[in-house]
Amino acid sequence: GLTLFGEAQRYLPYFILAVPEMGRNGVGPGRGQFALRAVAAVDPLEGKDQMVLAEGETLVRVPDRLITAERVQQAADRCAPADRLRLTFRTPMRLIDEGRLVKAPDFGVLFQRLLERLDELNQQYGGGSGRPAAEVQALQTLANQVRLVESHMDWIELKSGSTRSGKVTWLSGFVGTAEYAAPFGVWRALLPWLLWGTIAQAGKDVVKGNGVYEIVSASEAKQSHGARQEIASSHTTRLAMTDGRGEA
């Protein structure tokens, strides 16, 4: 799957044109080949698809439904939990804190890494400036108030090799579900950023598929982020697009 941020969305047609050539040339050690059949843009906030390239066609339809800060805030207002919130980690969440590998779903560390990623994306692709230190501290203070009340986790050992460099990179991380508790006001402030994280992912090695998670409120009102986890299938390649402005 492919997620485009900010100005990168302008190059969508070029990305799509390049994929078939990549498939013909092959990828990986065995130069495995593939064919692009169709492309659909996913709206992870509403769980809807918009056809970008239909099977058998050559016309690329640029999506007109982008993920914006306003839409994320509206989604957060609709699903703000009363006191508890559950995160389901779909792919390994690899967190590093002060140089050490974190093997538990510590919310404070998770939120810190998430905020760093969102700010980096905003600066690199959205033309944003650095977030004021006072705002970072205020959000992190709220995040540190969140308590882990229940956890069902597995640790997944994974590694990725590079034929070019001959090096091996460890991608290991935890998967499973974690339930957190905090006052309503805390969730109201943090939820927009958590929703952004379901699109941008969090932690280390997100470019290799790590850090995908979903949000489930205490009322079991599951958000429509399942499509985000299935953005690549044998029949359809999907993508999510955001305007890159992370101000919520």
Image (spheres, rainbow, N blue to C red):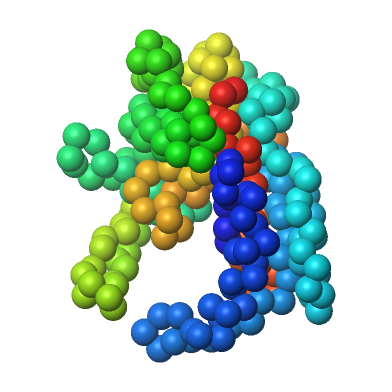
- Left of 243 or right of it: where is 26? left
Report which quarter residue 163 is drawn in: bottom left
Question: Residue at 63% of width from left, 41% of height from top?
Answer: 242
Between 109 and 68, the one nearer to me in the picture: 68
Question: Residue at 79% of width from left, 55% of height from top?
Answer: 50
Report which quarter residue 92 is drawn in: bottom left
Question: Residue at 71% of width from left, 41% of height from top?
Answer: 66
Question: Residue at 45% of width from left, 80% of height from top?
Answer: 27
Where the C terminus falls, by quadrant? top right
Residue 131, placed above or below residue 208: above
Residue 182, placed above or below residue 211: above
Residue 74 at x, y percent in the picture: 71, 25
- Left of 156 or right of it: where is 239? right
Between 239 and 114, the one nearer to me in the picture: 239
Is residue 4 in view? yes
Q: Residue furthest bottom?
A: 30
Between 177 and 194, the one nearer to me in the picture: 194
- Left of 25 or right of it: where is 58? right
Is residue 230 in view? no
Residue 40 at x, y percent in the picture: 73, 60
Residue 177 at x, y percent in the picture: 48, 44
Where the N terminus falls, by quadrant? bottom right
Q: Residue furthest left?
A: 99
Number of marks in picture: 0
Residue 171 at x, y percent in the picture: 32, 59
